[in-house]
Image (spheres, rainbow, N blue to C red):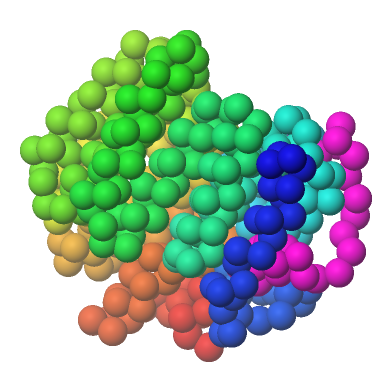
Amino acid sequence: MRRRNLLANLAVTAAAVASSRLPASGAEPGEATLGEALVAGLRDAMLGLGGASTALSPEQAPAELARALSDFHACRYGSLTVRLPRLIRAGHALGAGTNQYATLAQTYVLATWMLVKLDEQHLGWVAAGRARRLAEAGGDVLTVAEAARNLAVLARKAGWGERAMSIALAAADDPGLREAGRAGAAERGLLIQSAAYTAARGGDRQGMRQLTAEAGAIAAELGGTPLLRDHGGGINPITVQLHLISAENSASDPAAALAAARAIAPQSLPSVKRRSRYYTDVAAALGQLGRRDDCIRALLTAEHHAPEATHTRPAVRSLVSGLLASGRTTSELRGLAARSGVLT
């Protein structure tokens, strides 16, 4: 009975977090407003609003999820604006069943990633909670752990550093992951890596570097091919090093972030998403160091690789706004700001 009722019970929990500032979904957005359109679509799908969508059979849903994950790795936000809300509606329409729970849980994990990137924490909490409950109902230990990782990220963004650390490390110690072979080890590495970033945000540079080294040791033992690629991009030694750039930036050590970046050949990164993150993290470090021209060049390179992500992510738009306000502007900066919706 609990499984049969789960999907219906979940549908009412997002009502309190629907945001009145979001546009109605269904419009054709420009790149600068893709984030608002995506959040609006997810909001309405999670609330059971928005009209009928194309039905998916139980056999079609996993393939559609695979396409959405491909869009995520390629930073095709426009495609996700259509595909991801449709997957949520279709998943709820399919009803109970272990396979349906697994696919919908993974869909909610992907929705949480996007909501975190777009700084929509309220809906992110709802999506992460649904992902965990659905994964638990389906007995999917890896997705349960990935949902916990998302909850840890949300707790960190809410300023609850100790709780974020506890969520990530408790999930990493779950015996189920130790019984899940190489995939379980990879998920443990991702959770430890998340804890490292939390340590950085709390100003604990030594703890951050120790935890990053632990995640790196796991990645090195697993080999060079990224494992669990569909868990936010997965883990291998290069992705751990990429994560270190962000962590050093967060620990307010931009020189160390640039040193970490120099250890990576950007062309070796396994996806458009990863290359975009590399250049935006490098831009953030350069901005902290006052190297405006180099910062702008890094942002333009990120835009070249992933225009929709660069124009949409609040963190990047904030960096562009800061550059506009803090010094000399150039035609390149003004153009990037206009394309990002910072200048209208």
Is 178 located above or below residue 327 in the figure? Answer: above
Q: Nearer the viewer, residue 159 or 298?
A: 159
* Coordinates of residue 317 in the picture (x, y in percent): 42, 71
Magenta-span inclusion, residue 54: yes
* Coordinates of residue 10 in the picture (x, y in percent): 65, 56
Relative placement, left or right, of 13 versus 328 is right
Relative placement, left or right, of 295 versus 200 is right
Q: Quadrant of residue 236?
A: top left
Q: Quadrant of residue 156?
A: bottom left
Can residue 274 be seen here? The reply is no
Q: Quadrant of residue 97?
A: top right
* Coordinates of residue 94 in the picture (x, y in percent): 84, 44
Magenta-span inclusion, residue 42: yes
Is 27 located above or below residue 207 in the figure? Answer: below
Can residue 12 be seen here? The reply is yes
The residue under the point 37% across, 50% down is 153
The residue under the point 21% across, 26% down is 213
Per the rendered image, the range of residues in magenta is 38-62
The residue under the point 20% across, 31% down is 211
Relative placement, left or right, of 66 versus 109 is right
| Tally of marks | 0
Q: Residue extending furthest front?
A: 1
Is 263 located above or below residue 287 in the figure? Answer: above
Is 51 located above or below residue 261 in the figure? Answer: below
* Coordinates of residue 3 in the picture (x, y in percent): 71, 39
The residue under the point 56% across, 55% down is 127
